[in-house]
Image (cartoon, coloured by chain):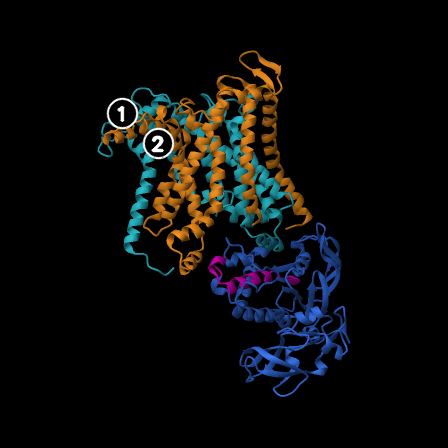
Amino acid sequence: MARAVTQQRKIANTALAWGIGFLIFFPILWTILTSFKTEAQAIADPPIFLGFDWTLANYEAVLERSNYGRFLWNSIVIAGGSTILGILIAVPAAWSMAFVPGKRTKDILLWMLSTKMLPAVGVLYPIYLLCIQFGVLDSKIALVIILMLINLPIIVWMLYTYFREIPGEILEAARMDGASLREEVLYVLTPMAIPGIASTLLLNFILAWNEAFWTLNLTAAKAAPLTAFIASYSSPEGLFYAKLSAASTMAIAPILILGWFSQKQLVSGLTFGAVK
Amino acid sequence: MATQHSRSAARLMMAPAVVLLLGWMLIPLTMTLYFSFKKYLPMRGGDLGWVGFDNYVRFVTSSAFWPSVMTTLIIVGGVLAITVILGILLAILLNQPMWGQGFVRILVIAPFFVMPTVSALVWKNMFMDPNYGLFAHLWEFFGAEPVQWMSQASLTSIIIIVSWQWLPFATLILLTAIQSLDREQLDAAEMDGAPATKRFAYITLPHLGRAITVVILIQTIFLLSIFAEIFVTTGGAFGTKTLTYLIFQRVLESQNIGLGSAGGVYAIILANIVAIFLMRIVGKNLDA
Amino acid sequence: MGQIKLNQVSKSFGDVQVIPPLDLTIEDGEFTVFVGPSGCGKSTLLRLIAGLEDITDGHIEIDGTDATNVPPAKRGLAMVFQSYALYPHMSVRKNIAFPMKMAGLPADEQNRRIEAAAKALNLTDYLDRRPGQLSGGQRQRVAIGRAIVREPSAFLFDEPLSNLDAALRVGMRLEISELHKRLATTMIYVTHDQVEAMTMADKIVVLRAGFIEQVGSPLELYHRPCNEFVAGFIGSPKMNLIKGAEADKRGAPTIGIRPEHIDVSTSAGDWQGKVGVAEHLGSDTFLHVHGVDGCDPMTVRVDGELPVKHGDTIFLTPQAEKLHRFDAQGLRIE
């Protein structure tokens, strides 16, 4: 393609793409802006975009109204715990499937994926009952385990996709060079797989962070993460747009930033390598 | 790689993941099947004995069943149509030469990372509220009567919210697929005298076929079970009760476990029909 | 020391037997080439020797001791892979040091060997680069360096030159041959390219479908191929195989004659044909001749230039003492 693109066309493309990008991003931007307004300005007619009195009062109000720190901590523990636990279980499995594939490897992988399709609502009551049985209803440990199980197929798949791109000859070379299985994993496989493991970690942390079926249905006061914290704003109470915006911003900001780092891995990760 | 030693080590390393998932699948599933054949009302007498296929029949014949299936199909179909069509257009646009492409990508992908409860609440209150929402201001600005989104256009509202969440996903995948298209194919088609529209129809679109299928199937699996978006907006009122939500209400709100479990079995069957198609596609990719 | 002995070694994947039981001895210091078309089992055979695959049946002896169940790392062999298999996250120096690190050699000894190998392979300036920053030929040399420093009892090469372009390939071929002369260590080299086999080997093992077709020195294979397959596989351009009346006349169901053993005349000869494509290389000319009974087209090599063009009639006479005769099963008739 050695053809020059005309300058006008490039300008037109840029303008259009930036316009649409802005439009898609607008609800998030609007939320962030509103979080710094007073409640009166938040519902002003006509709406105020930038010329308002910036204030942090809403953040203070939200922090006062509920224990944001606890919800945040629950989210971190639940998302982080389930992801790390999942990776610990998935790395050996993905390693063996990628490097010592057997006749059933493909079937096992597909079967794992099929457990992901189990509609949560179909098994809501049994899980609910089991949680009561083991006394873990409204506890972080129950959600760590459940979200780990939900995301385990995706974690195994993502790692498998990454591991498969590591040429088997390199591991054989290590073996010829005298490395034991432990040394092979330690010195050769792990350093090469770190980028893949990191992006798996990131994407699954995001998925677990945003999970809103089990977290809403299996928690009450004690273990509720940010999804439930926000859901508590679903019944309006007077003027609350600015406070809702502040709470929303606090709930999504950490993950939005993480998400932007992981967008490249998102595609192959969530399509199980079917689109690269 | 394939010595006896490494094979047995491999099996051992796979075991924890396989056993856990097997348990995760079988135990709740068996319990759901068990309850679905019982009259089971924890708040009103508990286990009232076996009732055969009674729950299955009652679930299907209840006046809420067919509307909920319709609602599910409309939401899934509407969101799929919007995200796939807009996704293709957006992917093509983003693939054009421009300044700041990376930045636009960041803007476009952002909604995917917003948790469902947040996006539903923000849209419901700050955009679709008939008094204070931005849409109301916009409508008034053009001299129109503001729409009562959540009550009069409830399904449309939910489709808009969910589409906004999933458009980034569709766009990103389709963009990746477009970028993998061999430029030389397009050049060859141009040499063969195909104009831009024909090049799109005969080269680009078939190339995207597989990515589009993947988008449709993966989104379908997630869309069939959307929950939070309905939970925090309409709470299932105004004709927004999907199959998932109906089952949720039977189980948690009216505490009719038997009936809800039978509904759950229907949902599992429905999801598995979709899953079979996805498996075929992903399975093919494994061979390639 | 590096004598390798295969005793009734066989390999099956499930029900499919890829290597039927075979015997082979590779003498210490010998450069042995396994050659054959793709899928003939030559790489599998190499991996069995390396220990990267289990042997289904039989025994492997290295230097007189049974190595059948010895893991690859303990066999004292070094391997150079087709993809080079360099560790992408390590510098060239660390790549070369890795086997010594695994063996627990002292650091000064490691450095001494690295410097020596780098000097021999022209890598001194690249020791601190990553493999990704090197050209194909340089990566190849790093892979060889990593093998050398172990001072193994034998080197295994798995199609090491197939990822290089033609010019580099010729250069690396020479370097590997020189390396062998200098180290005098046993080398086993797998390739599908018969030119590599002919130019490098002390001993060639021709394989087809897991079977050893013939073992011998390059010139033995060239002059006395034991069957039609070896005859067609060794030598470039390929030997012409002629069936039918012309073969019967010379006392065999099939006869073979190499392109360089045919005399050409524009006036008279045993066979008459029309010139199809003539490839002029300057030093010699290859003619593809059509219309000869029992072999169409027949390839002929002529020294220097020959002023013929497409469509010319030409006469060919095989050199009688250079004819090969094969029986109905394709085996050589003496």
Mark 2 secondary-structure assignment? helix
In this view, the residue farthest toward the bottom is C267
Using the image, determine if residue B5 lies above or below residue B225. Answer: below
- Please identify the quarter of the rendering in which residue B127 is found: top left
On the image, numbered disc 1 is attached to which residue? A39
What amino acid is labelled 2 in the image?
Thr
Relative to C282, is C18 on the left or the right?
right
Instruction: Estimate how packed mark 2 is, as few (under 14), some (14 to 19) or many (20 or more) residues with alpha carbons within 10 Å.
Output: many
Q: Is residue A67 left or right of residue C183?
A: left
Describe residue A130's horizontal placement relative to residue C61 as left or right: left
Which quadrant of the figure has residue A64? top left
Of residues B121 and B186, the one nearer the viewer is B186
Q: What residue range appears in magenta?
A: C127-155
The chain drawn orange is chain what? B
Residue A223 % position (x, y): 47, 24
- Chain letter of disc 2 in the image: A
Q: Which secondary structure, mark 1?
A: helix
In the depicted structure, whether residue B209 falls above or below residue C3: above
Residue A133 visible in the displayed image? no
Give the Cα separation between the discs numbered 1 and 2. 16 Å
Q: Colour of chain C?
A: blue
Q: Is residue A186 left or right of residue A56?
A: right
Provide residue A11's location: percent of width, then percent of height. Answer: 28, 51
The image quadrant of residue C224 is bottom right
Residue type indicated by callout 1: Glu
Query: What residue do we see at 58% from left, 16% from top?
Result: B39
Residue extending farthest top:
B45
Residue C220 showing in the rendered view = yes
Residue that mark 2 sits on: A249
Marks 1 and 2 on same chain: yes
Figure colour of chain A: cyan
Q: Position of residue B189 (x, y in %)?
A: 42, 57
